[in-house]
Structure formats: C-alpha cells, structure tokens
Image (cartoon, rainbow, N blue to C red):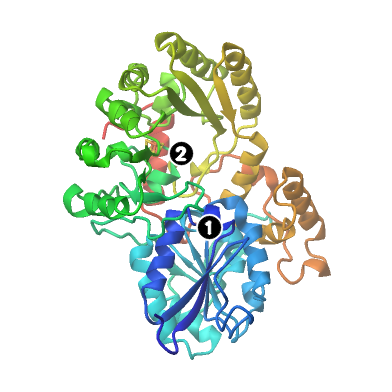
C-alpha cells in the first residue's frame, strides 16, 4: 500500500492492455514502482487503465510522474495522445510547476531519444534495475523544488538525460554540429547504465487477457555475444549477461509455473545461455507434463535433436532461427558466424525432434549486398525444402534499417531492397515456401525515426491520427517541411526537419556528429567504426 504523501505516478503504454501487459519491460517497471511505499502508481493503456488517483469519478490530484514505456519507434504519436488525454502539455517546454515529470525508457529511447526528446522531461538510458530507483529517489528528494531546479537535479543522476538542458547546434547546411549542455554544471555526456546483477527479469503479472494468454515470461539472457553488425539487441545492451541456473533461472521459472502452465523464455538469443541445455533437461521432468514452453529466436548453430525433442514435447510446433542471408559472403559481412551446413543441420534436428516447422529470418538491403546474394537466399530455402521434406518452411524478411550504437549506424537504407523483396517473393512463393516480407515503406519510416535529431519532433506530432498509414507519415513530413520558419511552427521548431534522403538513405562519414554522439552507448564510436570497417573489408570477427 502506498503511504500518505506518496508520489503520484502513472505508467503508460502506447497500445492496448493486451499488448502492453505482454511487454516484460513494462511489467518490470510497473512492479518496481508498485513495490515502493513512497510511490502510488496507476497503469494506463490506450483502451483502459487503473482508476485515476483520487477515485474513478475524478481525474484526481495533480501527478508527480508520468512514465512512458516505448518499445516500437512508430508508437511516438500515441504517446502524445496519452499525454493529452491526461491534460499534460505534449511539449516539455510548455509544462509548468504543476505538471508531472514526463519520463521514458526502453530500447528505442536508449538508442536514439532525440526525435522524441522535446516531449520528455527525462529519459532513462540503460537498464532499469539501477536507474529507476535512483531516478525516483531523486524525484522524491527534490519534489518541492521549482520545476527547473528539479530537472537540474535529475540531470545529475547517472544515466538520466534531461533533453531541455542540452542545446543542439546546426551548421548553415542544416548539418548537426553538436548537442551540448545549455548551462554550467550539466554533464557534457550521459552514459547508459548497465545492471551487472545475476538475476534478470520475469513476469509479475500473469493474465488470460495478455496477447500471449496466461504466459509467464522469463528473461534468460540479456544482450548477445555474437555482435552481428546491425543488431541493436546485441550492441545496445552489452555486455552479454546470463543468470545462473540454480539461483536465477530455475527459481524464476518455478515461481511462474506454480501459477500457469505457459512459459516463455525470452532473450536476444536464448540458446546462448551456457546452461540452456540443463534448463531444458530440467523442464523435461514429468512434473511439467502439460506445460507449454516457447522460446524466442535461437541461434541455428545451437539447435540439437534434444532441443527439438523437448520443445516439441512441451508444445512448440516450430523453431525460429535468424540466418540474415543465404549468402556465406553476406553472413561474413554482417559477422554472422553461421555455416550453411549448420542451417541444414538445424532444419534436420528440428524435424527429427518432432517439430513441424522452421521459421527463418533474413534481411535484404544489407551493406555491400548484390542481387546474387539475394538469389543465394532463395536458393538456400529451396534446397532446404528438398533436404527436409515435410518440414514447413517460412521466411520472414525485413529491409536493413540502421540503428544507433551499432557498427552499421552510419549506413543508409538501400532503395534496391524493395526490388529484392519482390525477387524473393517471385522465387519462393510458387514453390510453396511461405514468405513474410516486412514493408519496405515502413522500413524507410523506421530509419527516419532511428537516425533523426530533435527537429523531427514536429513531424511526430503532426503524424498524430494518421500514424497508421505510410501516407500519413509522409504527409506530416511534407507539412512540417513547408511550414518550417512560419508562425505556425514557432512553438516547436523554426528549422526544417532533417533532410529525408540524408537521414534515410545516405551512408554517413564516421567523423560526422550523430544525434546521439553526446549519449554514450556500451562501445565507443571508434570501436563501432572498427567493427564496421573490418566487416566491410570482409574480415570476420574471430572472437
Ligand atoms: S545472433 Fe541474433 S541476437 Fe545475436 S547479435 Fe546476431 S542478430 Fe543479434
């Protein structure tokens, strides 16, 4: 129970209850806040929420904190709707002493918060385990101070980025020259915080209303040691961490299985856990009869007949592996240490174990990719079908999108990707291989959001109400471009948004100031540039 005088907080998710409650990140942040007696936290989704502070009939007293959990770049406009619904000004600069501190975290904001920066008072960069308690302590300590002073104090907490205390500088050509502290005493850079504890997160809410009904989720690994050059899930969250089996994973799994029979093992690449085979053997016990276990993507080279057998016995029908490309050369470029023979073996073992399907994931438009590399992907799928008859194959394929803090952050989206998605469809569909392509057009919008600076914020605001359509985003961009510098835009930006082609398609020089240069990721830019250079020169990381 919250104590008298507790901080009044709302934690929002930019989607429905069903989707939001299936986000382990959201659940963990909510549980961390709810456990504190000095915080009275209510949940808010787009379709429902807890009763507001002060009772269901009132909008309650003023809030101290409004938290937003963002796991998908394209959800930015929905966040603004939620703020407005709570009568909170959407622009941080328009909030006053009586408005809450609007904060956010999660992978999208940790990678590049700048496009959304003008909407947030504070962004938490990195793992919540350390950051969230330190942040809430600081809010509590300075809760009676004027807003400007509260923000200054929050900016002193390691990993807490207060965008309004940093000012961007642009050159006459529109190029970003730097993002620097706007006043003395504010740190020049903010470093992402890393939790090094042994226990990772698991569900605190199990509900039949979740998108995966009644599932208990357990985080098996954090980050991934493979360092595929495009991979945000690996680079953003380094170092690779694994809880021990006996004191970490088994108690977390056991706790959930006392309440449900559905278990989800999560992580960028769960089979990388050094004791994953032992965990599976433990789940093979008769007392777990009737339990359904699902795993997120596994590394192809770690698939064994035993893995296939236990997953099939525990209700899984298929296995998911990311191959990125059917071309050995392309896999070398992206540092995917995976031989074609290992892909064939994974398919064989999945089938031998009793699984009926294999889902493969790949990409087109990767740096240096030629049409022949995409032909090789089609050929691999066709050969795999012949080699493992009866195993249902599907290929999910997306367009490469550059992500901040990865070695390929400087690379642009390649327009030829669109044609290559069609090429795969032409080769595979007539042969009965299911192809699940992600829209090229949406990849372009994702790149716009992942590499822009804060001049994109007015576009995000203008996309409200039409962010479900590609045309809506393009129209919002055009409108903001046309209005830049006119009185209509004076509130948020008098400079045009970042140039479309430059942000999305251009391969940038490594010397360039990036929108996130003032925010330190796990690896220094020089290290990332070194990884990119060796990959593009064809050298594989030997680890
Ligand atoms: S193996 Fe998968 S999770 Fe690991 S770095 Fe490569 S793409 Fe990322």
Can residue 305 be seen here? The reply is yes
Check the image and name the residue furthest to the top.
Answer: 386
Q: Quadrant of residue 295?
A: top left
Mark 2: few, some, or many residues within 10 Å (few <14, many ≥20)? many
Q: Is residue 475 above or below residue 531?
A: below
Q: Quadrant of residue 347?
A: top left
Numbered-mark total: 2
Ligand 1 shows up in which quadrant of the image?
top left
At which x and y percent is residue 138? 40, 80
Can residue 159 be seen here? The reply is no
Q: Is mark 1 within 8 Å of ligand 1?
A: no
Pick whichever, 333 or 83, lies toward us. Answer: 83
Q: Is mark 2 within 8 Å of ligand 1?
A: yes
Q: Is residue 440 above or below residue 386?
A: below
Q: Which residue is mark 2?
A: 230
> Residue visible at 27% across and 25% down?
304
Q: Which residue is mark 1?
A: 70
Pick whichever, 400 or 34, lies toward us. Answer: 34
């Amino acid at each position: 129970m919250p104590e008298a005088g507790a901080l009044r907080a709302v934690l929002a998710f930019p989607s429905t209850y069903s989707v939001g409650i299936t986000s382990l990140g959201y659940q963990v942040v909510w549980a961390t806040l709810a456990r504190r007696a000095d915080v009275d936290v209510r949940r808010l989704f787009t379709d429902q929420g807890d009763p507001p502070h002060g009772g269901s009939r009132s909008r309650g007293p003023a809030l101290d904190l409004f938290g937003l959990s963002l796991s998908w770049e394209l959800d930015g406009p929905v966040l603004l709707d939620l703020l407005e619904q709570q009568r909170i000004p959407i622009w941080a600069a328009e909030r006053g002493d009586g408005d809450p501190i609007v904060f956010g975290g999660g992978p999208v904001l940790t990678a590049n918060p700048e496009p959304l920066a003008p909407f947030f008072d504070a962004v938490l960069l990195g793992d919540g385990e350390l950051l969230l308690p330190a942040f809430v302590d600081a809010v509590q300590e300075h809760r009676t101070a004027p807003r400007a002073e509260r923000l200054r104090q929050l900016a002193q907490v390691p990993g807490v980025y207060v965008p309004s205390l940093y000012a961007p500088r642009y050159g006459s050509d529109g190029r970003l020259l730097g993002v620097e502290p706007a006043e003395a005493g504010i740190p020049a850079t903010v470093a992402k915080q890393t939790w090094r504890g042994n226990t990772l997160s698991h569900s605190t809410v199990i509900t039949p209303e979740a998108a995966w009904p009644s599932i208990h989720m357990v985080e098996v690994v954090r980050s991934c040691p493979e360092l595929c050059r495009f991979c945000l899930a690996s680079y953003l969250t380094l170092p690779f961490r694994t809880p021990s089996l006996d004191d970490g994973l088994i108690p977390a799994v056991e706790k959930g299985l006392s309440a449900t029979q559905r278990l989800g093992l999560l992580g960028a690449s769960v089979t990388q856990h050094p004791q994953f085979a032992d965990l599976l053997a433990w789940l093979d016990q008769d007392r777990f009869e009737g339990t359904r276990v699902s795993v997120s993507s596994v590394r192809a080279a770690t698939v064994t007949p035993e893995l296939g057998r236990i997953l099939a016995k525990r209700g899984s029908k298929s296995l998911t592996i990311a191959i990125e490309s059917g071309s050995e050369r392309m896999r070398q470029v992206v540092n995917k240490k995976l031989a074609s023979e290992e892909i064939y073996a994974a398919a064989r073992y999945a089938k031998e174990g009793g699984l009926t399907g294999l889902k493969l994931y790949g990409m087109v438009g990767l740096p240096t990719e030629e049409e022949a590399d995409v032909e090789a992907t089609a050929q691999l799928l066709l050969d795999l079908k012949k080699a493992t008859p009866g195993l249902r194959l599907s290929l999910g394929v997306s367009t490469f999108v550059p992500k901040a803090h990865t070695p390929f952050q400087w690379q642009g989206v390649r327009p030829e990707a669109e044609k290559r998605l069609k090429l795969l469809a032409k080769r595979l569909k007539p042969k009965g291989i299911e192809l699940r392509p992600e829209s090229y057009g949406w990849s372009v919008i994702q790149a716009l959001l992942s590499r822009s600076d804060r001049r994109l914020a007015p576009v995000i605001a203008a996309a409200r109400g039409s962010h479900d359509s590609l045309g809506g985003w393009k129209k919002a961009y055009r409108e903001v471009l046309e209005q830049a510098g006119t009185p209509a835009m004076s509130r948020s930006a008098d400079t045009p948004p970042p140039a479309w082609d430059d942000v999305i398609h251009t391969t940038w020089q490594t010397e360039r100031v990036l929108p996130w240069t003032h925010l330190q990721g796990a690896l220094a830019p020089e290290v990332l540039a070194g990884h990119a250079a060796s990959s593009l020169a064809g050298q594989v990381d030997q680890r």
